[in-house]
Amino acid sequence: MSSPAPPTTGPGPDDLPNGQPADQAPPDDPEVPLPLPPEEEFWEKYNRRFEFPFSTVGAVLLHVGVAFVVVMLLAKMKSAAPDKNLPVVISPIDGLDPFDGAPGAGMENTDTVAQDDKIETPPIPPEDLQKLPDVLETIKDVLPDPDGNISKEKRADFANVDKNLAKALARGDGTHGKGPGGLGENSAAGQSLRWTLRFRTRSARDYIYQLSILNAKLLVPLPPDNKRCMLYENLAADTPRGRLATDEDIKQLSGQVRFSDRDRDSVRQMAGALGLDEAPKIFYAFLPLQIRDDLAAKERAYAGMDPRDIGETIIQMSVGGGRYDARVIEQRDRRGKPIPPKR
């Protein structure tokens, strides 16, 4: 009877090649991959204590706060800075308007006149003063007034334009009357040399807006010789576009009441708004017959004076909300003496 075989000492089916049981393998054995935990999701990794939402909200609030501080600083600087939009005025001879307004603003109360409303005549540059004798020689032959009794301020209106244009505008449509000065109190030429219009504006764009409400046309003599003129007929366009004026245009415009602006700041701003490469010396605005008749009626009603005895009528124009209101605020006789209004 044979005895049982002794147990083998070789590796079993579950042992490692060196004979060590698999469950006793060292944990750091590089040959045995350890099970890894699943990767954390983004929100689990950065949101254990709500770090991500808190940091996001904090960053947004910080940017909002900085933006608010910047806006407040800019607003404060703007309110403290002087207004660089120079006032502009359109007038046959003078009158830099100290007031301001805005496009589309409501009409103002025109029942009363501030006591400090004054007309300040813009100074005539020395180089223009030297031209005034020649200006008178140029235009006096087209004026029925044999003495050429035109103030230097009104003569300065023609100091920087071509002689032919100066004659055409001074002559008007030729319907001169027989009143004092020979200009005719109801002619376009006589009214243009007698009326001063004051506008409340903030900028050249506001200037153009107000003139568009009046259906005015702009005539701009082009430097350097001022023989050619740009004519702007539609000032209501977003960007007014002009064209070279013809002799027929000048002839037609000369029969309308005109107002000029020769103030350097006003002309410079208007040139920029119209896209002109170089600022002219002066420009003219021409009003339609309907407005001319309205102003003439208000001139007569102010003091009941015969227009032949009036040397100057100053009219305040308030333009806004798509309409205008004109009010005579001052009159002077032909000797320059103030005329009291009719009670």
Image (spheres, helix red, strand yellow):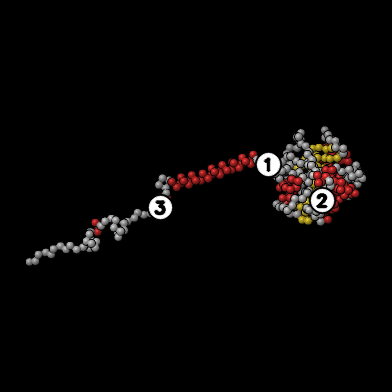
Q: Nearer the viewer, mark 2 or mark 3?
A: 2
Q: Is residue 139 above or below residue 306?
A: below
Quadrant showing the C terminus: top right
Q: Which mark is residue 161?
A: 2
Q: Amino acid at mark 3?
A: Glu
Residue at 78% in and 56% down? 244
The answer, for residue 317, to whether it is visible in the render is no
Structural crowding at the residue carrying mark 2, measured as other residues with C-alpha within 10 Å and reported as few (<14), some (14–19) or many (≥20): many
Secondary element at tag 2? loop
Secondary element at tag 1? loop
Secondary element at tag 3? loop
Residue at 86% in and 48% down? 134
Q: Which residue is mark 3?
A: 41
Q: Nearer the viewer, mark 3 or mark 1?
A: 1
Q: Is residue 284 left or right of residue 203?
A: right
**What x and y, as percent, mark residue 254?**
84, 50
Q: Which mark is residue 25?
A: none
Q: Amino acid at mark 1?
A: Asp
**What x and y, as percent, mark residue 153?**
83, 43
Q: Which residue is mark 1?
A: 83
Taking depth in this image into account, of 39 and 106 the one nearest to the observer is: 39
